[in-house]
Image (cartoon, grey):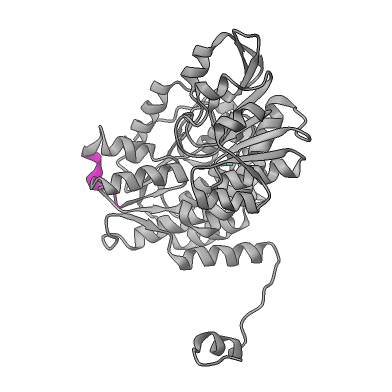
Amino acid sequence: MPVSDVADLALAPSGRRRIEWADRDMRVLAAIRERFAVERPLEGIRIAASLHVTAETANLMRTLRAGGADVVLVASNPLSTQDDVAAALVADHAVTVLALRGEDTATYYGHINAAIDHAPHITMDDGADVIGVMHGERREMLAGVIGGTEETTTGVIRLRALERSGGLAFPVVSVNDADTKHMFDNRYGTGQSTVDGLLRATNMLVAGKRAVVGGYGWCGRGVASRLRGMGAAVVVTEVDPLKALEAVMDGFEVMPFAAAARVGDLFVTATGDVNVVRGEHIAVMKDGAIIANAGHFNVEIDLPALAELAVSVREVRPSVEEYRMADGRAVFLLAQGRLVNLSVAEGHPAAVMDMSFANQALVVEHIVRQRGHLDVRVHRVPREIDREIARLKLSTLGIGIDVLTEEQRDYLASWDQGT
Ligand code: ADE
């Protein structure tokens, strides 16, 4: 059993208050937790979770513990850990946590390996790092796994690549594909928390700026819409013609990144792919341009190219580095190119993480119940779970909706009724 590695257990009281505050907006998860405490569906199940260690994640961990699971939690990003929350999880909730805000790469992977030492029945990833290491260096641990879950788009892309290569060793459920996840967490969560990160880092005025959003998936849509809401003129860049068309019809200007690089004041990447902002783009950016990343990994901005173009680098505010070019221009990089919403702000608000983590909890229960019956592939979240979460969320918000009349149901089931 791995031993906790957190910054300072004395921070637990502050973490406890944050967890309580988040819990107020996580009523769906609380309802699941109450049921889990009675039914104990995860009794004896060992879980290795690699997630952003936040107050919202803490409430998921409490839910898994209430269900009887034995959980080890490690970070899914070196910069997103809330050290006080990590301390409270260890002190109050008997969760083994190995996560330190700002941990270096060796420590980060040391912690991932420690989570694998836990011999998990279930893996829970946000970015596929546990599964990636298990399918690489730690293959001896694969046999004991019943199944895994994946939280984010980037992780699902990696898992589908693993599945296509024929190498996936156990069934995995893509929590990201649930409607109650990506339509809310990716869009409203990333949208709001990315703007929050930009503002906390820079205190910039968004109104009147030209903001360039790289990618118009669910995250990019959210970021573009929230920046527009604050008065920015938003340019979208895309590689997918359908998404580009959607951005046009949503009222955004669409152009290739090379053209956008010349006109933008602010750049936010949300593509999930590498080197979206490259040297040739940075070379033509305006003096004072700000570059940030909202994607999972710090690969969307070509950091080596940025460093190579600069004659000097200095930190001008916490999480803001000024790269000075030979021609005198300055370009500002936020949070070292790591995801700005979790590195500088606090990630998505609890009210959306409620649905994402309700999916996680119910999907783990589903995998345990279906033990031995799920094919080895990447699965979608069962439709009933998705709908149940939407129903519960509406009910916790006190919102009622209509039900079909019998006549309406019959009409929808018929093929011969017209005008
Ligand atoms: N991913 C995005 N926001 C998050 C949060 N608040 N907690 C955990 N994971 C997240």
Query: Relative to 88, is 152 on the left or the right?
Result: left
For ligand 1, give the image quadrant. top right
State the quadrant of the C terminus: bottom right
What is the magenta range?
Answer: 140-146
Q: Is residue 89 above or below residue 380?
A: above
Query: Relative to 316, is 274 on the left or the right?
Result: left
Let me know if residue 375 is in the magenta part.
Answer: no
| Total tally of numbered discs in the picture | 0
* Coordinates of residue 183 in the picture (x, y in percent): 57, 55
Image quadrant in which you'd find residue 18: top right
* Coordinates of residue 105 in the picture (x, y in percent): 42, 23
Majority SS type along the magenta span: helix
Q: Is residue 327 above or below residue 36?
A: above
Image quadrant in which you'd find residue 342: top right
Identity of the residue drawn at 55% across and 27% down = 9
Of residues 405 and 217, the one nearer the viewer is: 217
Of residues 101 and 7, the one nearer the viewer is: 101
* Coordinates of residue 258 in the picture (x, y in percent): 55, 30
Identity of the residue drawn at 49% across and 36% down = 296
* Coordinates of residue 212 in the picture (x, y in percent): 63, 35
Identity of the residue drawn at 66% across and 46% down = 252
State the quadrant of the N terminus: top left
Of residues 143 and 64, the one nearer the viewer is: 143
Residue 137 appears in view: yes
Residue 343 appears in view: no
Q: Is residue 196 above or below residue 240?
A: above
Q: Is residue 361 above or below residue 154?
A: below
